[in-house]
């Protein structure tokens, strides 16, 4: 069974700082990997989707990379803002379902 | 089409009662998924449909849980004889079938169930 781990579990940074969230998975035979954002008590908002054949995807201030062979992905957030405060979840598609990590709770301090 | 819709947003029920949740997926998505999320955890897979066929069920889906997707459109998730351990956020997602390039999930806002 695929296991997904996210480090750190929580992160607090001052506004304007660049930051990196990490995700690792145990089985490299994945179809794709998706990063989500979740605000307290809300559903999940998709941020970036990386196909297994891709190395990275970018959207605005966000950049996600994928190294399938080592079972790792990173989400880079540039020039963080207080509105970025949320939980960030990494999910890998393995077969017909996604396996999720437990998330990184990010707080950006004004 | 504005995305995946879930109803209700919140449900409080007494232990032993039955509850039913509804999910309306993105219209062109033929796959629909149910996940459950407890506090501080990532979502866990419950079941998925391709069109009207329920193709996979997790061991988390006990006999008290049943899901349907009549006509391959909206889906319902019913929990019978609710227990306090059923308290969680129930998330619905939809996607295109495998093989399409943009095979990612779109999630709804979830239904928060509290069993008292």
Image (cartoon, rainbow, N blue to C red):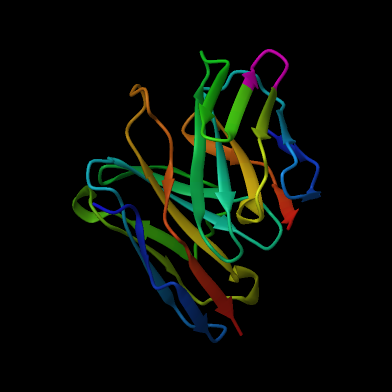
Q: Is residue B6 magenta?
A: no
Is A107 placed left or right of B12 in the picture? Answer: right
- Residue B8 vertical position relative to residue B57 in the rendered view, above or below: below
From the viewer's perspective, is residue A5 above or below residue B114?
above
Rendering coords of residue A7 (x, y %): 79, 39
Residue B19, image quadrant = bottom left
Q: Tell me if residue B73 can be seen.
A: yes
The reply to whether residue B59 is in sight is no
Q: Is residue A58 above or below residue A16?
A: above
Q: Residue at x 28, y 48 (%)?
A: B26
Q: In screen coordinates, is A9 left or right of B45?
A: right
* Left or right of B74 in this view: A31: right
Q: In the image as oriented, which residue stretches furthest toward the left?
A: B71
Of residues A49 and B100, the one drawn nearer to the viewer in this rendering: A49
What span is colored magenta in the figure? A66-71
Q: Residue at x 59, y 18 (%)?
A: A29
Q: Quadrant of the C terminus of chain B?
A: bottom right
Q: Which residue is drawn at 38% across and 58% down?
A: B67
Nearer the observer, B34 or B96: B96
């Amino acid at each position: 069974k695929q296991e997904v781990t996210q480090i750190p579990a929580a992160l607090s940074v001052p506004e304007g700082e660049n930051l990196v969230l990490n995700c690792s998975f145990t089985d490299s035979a994945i179809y794709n990997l998706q990063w989500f954002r979740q605000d307290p008590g809300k559903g999940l908002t998709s941020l970036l989707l990386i196909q297994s054949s891709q190395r990275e995807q970018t959207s605005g201030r966000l950049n996600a990379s994928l190294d399938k062979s080592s079972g790792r992905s990173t989400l880079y957030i540039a020039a963080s803002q207080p509105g970025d405060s949320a939980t960030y979840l990494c999910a890998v598609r393995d077969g017909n379902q996604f396996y999720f990590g437990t998330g990184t709770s990010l707080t950006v301090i004004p | 089409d504005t995305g995946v819709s879930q109803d209700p947003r919140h449900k409080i029920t007494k232990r032993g009662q039955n509850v039913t949740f509804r999910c309306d997926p993105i219209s062109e998505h033929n796959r629909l998924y149910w996940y459950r999320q407890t506090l501080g955890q990532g979502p866990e897979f419950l079941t998925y449909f391709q069109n009207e066929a329920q193709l996979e069920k997790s061991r988390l889906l006990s006999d008290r849980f049943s899901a349907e997707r009549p006509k391959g459109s909206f889906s319902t998730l019913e929990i019978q004889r609710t227990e306090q351990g059923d308290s969680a956020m129930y998330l619905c997602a939809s996607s295109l079938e495998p093989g399409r390039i943009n095979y990612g999930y779109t999630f709804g806002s979830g239904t928060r169930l509290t069993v008292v």
